Amino acid sequence: MKHQVRVLKTDEELQAALKRLSMLMSTELSTGSDEEAEFELLELVIGAYERDHVRRPFVSALEAINFRMEQQKLTRKDLEPFIGSQSKVSEVLAGKRPLSLQMIQRLHNGLGIPAKALIDGSSHDEATLELADSYPIEKLPLKEMRERGLVTSTVRDAAEKQVRAFLERVAHLAHEPALLRAPLHQSGGRTMDTHALFIWRAVVVDKAHQNPPQGIYKAGTITPTWLRDLAKLSRFEQGPKLAQEFLSQHGICLVTELPFKKTYLDGCAMLDGDRPIIGLTLRHDRVDNFWFALLHEAVHVQKHLTPQCRFIADNLDDKGRAGQSQEDEADLGAQEALIPPELWAAAKVQHTHSAEDARELAALAGVAPAIVAGRVRHQTGNWRLLSNLISEAGSVKPWFQVVA
């Protein structure tokens, strides 16, 4: 984000923020862009400053629209180019549909309605805006959503209402008002289906709020020693569940949710306010993959999540990730947490590929033998090596009651 948004402390800063907001209003903001995120943050800091420092009559968005309609003798039909279909116009004028960012821009640029009136008066339900404009119902993975119980109706209008109700609830739960609209920082070169990813993200946030962490996350909690302690839990059969409890004690939510089609997703790291959430898909239901993905996302939480970078999605199979600094750093951090570099450098299993040597290294590193097997297979590119250690470790999904 080129323009850093800070808490406003003076009237001069307020005027500068309003000027920047007006400038953004006159441009085309693409979904998930840094400019859109900046617009969201400007709304928040301007609103917070004016609540504390500025006293003025409140004009709702609906009042502003009705005033302009009366002033210019406009009909509901005249509003369709700015708001959308006849039904959307009716819902907005009835107070049943909040204004989306696109609607606000069109009304401001086309009819000259002050942006502040439109923004202040809009309840701005973030999830509803996403669904209404950026994520149309016909592009959402409705079939998979029905299979997961997120939607029950097969009738389009009823299904849309159910999806909107779900997203509204998630948006109200989130500590960060714009979490569901946070720009996507995607690893690799294979493009994910953003509509399916949006729903997956919402489900993860919902699950995180259903089972909040026991502790409060503090910046600086995650250190190399902390990551090693987490990795060593892999030596226990119930290690995945112990990891979830360990993270919870430190204020981090670990959520598992199967991937939607065309997301090519292994996991994500995101910030909900000050609370980190790690989401894993378990699409490769192996112990070695679980622990590498978990440690990879934990390094993202440690080093890469910021108010400007609140959501990182990872396809760990994508070779296009190579050379991306954040991904290289997260990969290296995960590798060194699982098997310290000095142990790996001296490991016989690198050359022998024997199960006995793999178990010996695992004992020295304090991790599951499957993790050593996974490292050897990844390093050599031979996925048939040490398959007995992978199969012996079993499945991860039962620990989280995940049914494929």
Image (spheres, grey):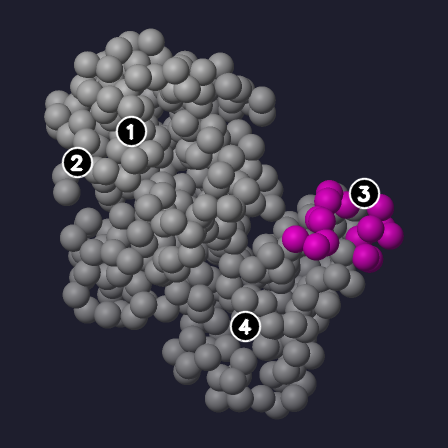
Residues at marks 3 and 2, CA–CA distance in whole angstroms: 61 Å
* Picture disc at residue 376: 1
Residue at the location (29% across, 58% down)? 262
Which residue appears at 60% of the width and 42% of the height?
307
Q: Which of the two discs, 3 and 2, labels the residue nearer the N terminus?
A: 3
Q: Which of 118 and 334 is in front in this view?
A: 334
Residue type (three-letter) at the residue carrying disc 4: Met
Q: Which of marks 2 and 4 is nearer the N terminus?
A: 4
Structural distance between the alpha carbons of marks 4 and 1: 54 Å
Determine the CA span between mark 1 and mark 2: 10 Å
Amino acid identity at mark 2 = Arg
Q: Specify which label sits upstream in the sequence, 4 or 1.
A: 4
Whole-angstrom CA distance, mark 1 to mark 3, is: 55 Å
- The residue where tag 2 is placed is 384
Say which element carries label 3. loop
Residue type pointed to by label 1: Val
Q: Quadrant of residue 337?
A: top left
Q: Is residue 7 magenta?
A: yes
Residue 190 in the figure: left or right of residue 95: left
